[in-house]
Amino acid sequence: MHMAKGDFVEVLVDAGSGSAREYVIEATRAGRSVEVRSSRTTVEVRELTRTGGVVRTARFVAPRVLAVVEHPKAA
């Protein structure tokens, strides 16, 4: 899924011993978007430029991911 500037994705990951860690990936500039891809082994969140170039990538081990929440920008 593609999201636009101002949108962000929260990823909640099991950190072990009963605790969780939250990561937030945001489309930070005009023309940027956030894309979420998942497979059996990984969840990948990428910030992309307008032309599709990757600005940054966050990869998580899928079995440790508790939740992925996509937040569209408020209208």
Image (spheres, helix red, strand yellow):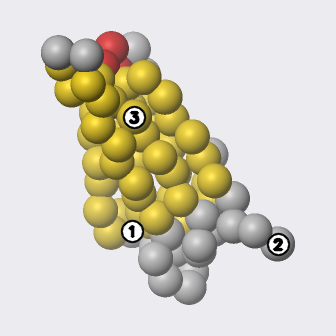
- Please name the residue shown 26% across and 25% down the image: 19
Left or right: 19, with 70 as reference point: left
Which of pointers 3 and 1 lies earlier in the amino acid sequence?
3
* Quarter placement of the C terminus: bottom right
Mark number for residue 75? 2
Q: Pointer 1: what residue?
A: 53
Front position in the image: 55 or 68: 68
Up the image or down, 10 lies above or below 67; here it is below
Q: Residues within 10 Å of mark 2 (few under 14, many from 20)?
A: few
Which marked residue is nearer to the observer: mark 3 or mark 1? 3
Q: Quadrant of residue 53?
A: bottom left
Up the image or down, 66 lies above or below 4; here it is above
Which of pointers 1 and 2 lies earlier in the amino acid sequence?
1
SS type, badge 1: loop
The answer to whether residue 41 shows anywhere in this view is no
Q: Pointer 3: what residue?
A: 12
Q: Amino acid at mark 3?
A: Leu
Q: Amino acid at mark 2?
A: Ala
